[in-house]
Amino acid sequence: MTLSERLNAYERLMRLDRPIGILLLAWPTLWGLWLSSAGRPDLVVLWVFVLGVVLMRSAGCVINDYADRGFDPHVERTRDRPLASGEVSGREALALAAGLSLLALLLILPLRNPLLVGLAAVAAFLAASYPYTKRFLAIPQAYLGLSFGFGIPMAYAAHLGSVPAIAWWLLAANVFWAIAYDTEYAMVDRDDDVKIGIRTSAITFGRFDVAAVMLCYAAALGLLAIVGWRQHLGWAYYGGLAAAAGVAAYHYTLIRGRARAKCFKAFLHNNWFGAAIFAGIVLDLYLMDRVA
């Protein structure tokens, strides 16, 4: 294998060719960064977190494929992944994941924030352990939501030096959002997952999967509405929530027939759910700052 071919395999192993995972990790992190700073995030902190999102999502993908290397060859959608196809060895994957995680840690050390470092260690543990929860948790997507949302308390720690209760409300909202979008994703692979014995929310919810997805969207939006009330946010924020609700309603039209392609389209479209909420946060805090 030439150097360019190996680098291409590493890129695909880190899913840099499929940025949806970076976006789903970035949006809740950005919610936390803007709300914790009243709309004025520290630029150094912002860049550290943006780069950290890319590094940790990449490391998480590598660890996920390493954990699933015995399952992926038997799943139609994943059989061509670099580890499953043998392009990359298990030892290479572990070294790559370790290197990416170390770079993410080195990014936050200059901030000299012990609480942030401690939370980063928890985030790294969540990212590394998530792939294995599919062996024993009925709804591993909830654990994914914790992992993907842990940038929220980290953002508050970076800006405030503490993690107030509102950060955990935001994290809870992200957990329900993650269950919704990752159930849509799991609906694509349900038949394969049943055969190989992996647990997912799509299997656990069974024939109530569509209803469960919509209830999780509703729970996420309800918790975000509580966040807005507690933070005294205004019409722009709730407009963002309304736009996100419209996105969720559109997803219902896609997943109600349980067609694989449409379920996957709904999963990818969740970028706009997170973006709508972030746009509402940014605009509302900007308007509040103008009035002040």
Image: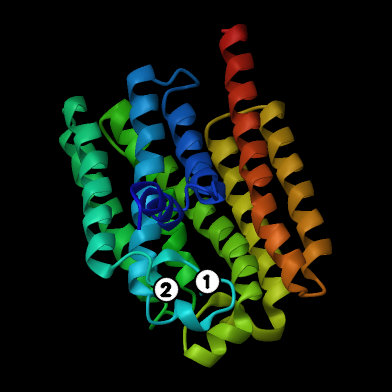
Q: As shown in the figure, which amino acid type bears the numbered disc 2? A: Ala
Residue 149: mark = none
Question: Are dots 2 and 1 in contact, CB under 8 Å?
Answer: yes
| Residue 123 picture location, percent across and down | 30, 52
Q: At x 65% / y 67%, what residue is drawn? A: 184
Q: As shown in the figure, which amino acid type bears the numbered disc 1? A: Thr
Q: Is residue 157 visible?
A: yes
Residue 84: mark = 2
What is the quadrant of the N terminus in the image?
bottom left
Q: Quadrant of residue 233?
A: top right
| Residue 105 picture location, percent across and down | 21, 40
Q: At x 41% / y 56%, what residue is drawn? A: 9
Q: Quadrant of residue 89?
A: bottom left
Q: At x 36% / y 57%, what residue is drawn? A: 60
Left or right, 233 with respect to 79, comes to right
**Which type of secondary structure does the marked residue at label 2 adopt?**
helix
219 lies above or below 55: below
Q: Earlier in the sequence, mark 2 or mark 1?
A: 1
Q: Nearer the viewer, residue 194 or 32?
A: 194
Q: Nearer the viewer, residue 124 or 179?
A: 124
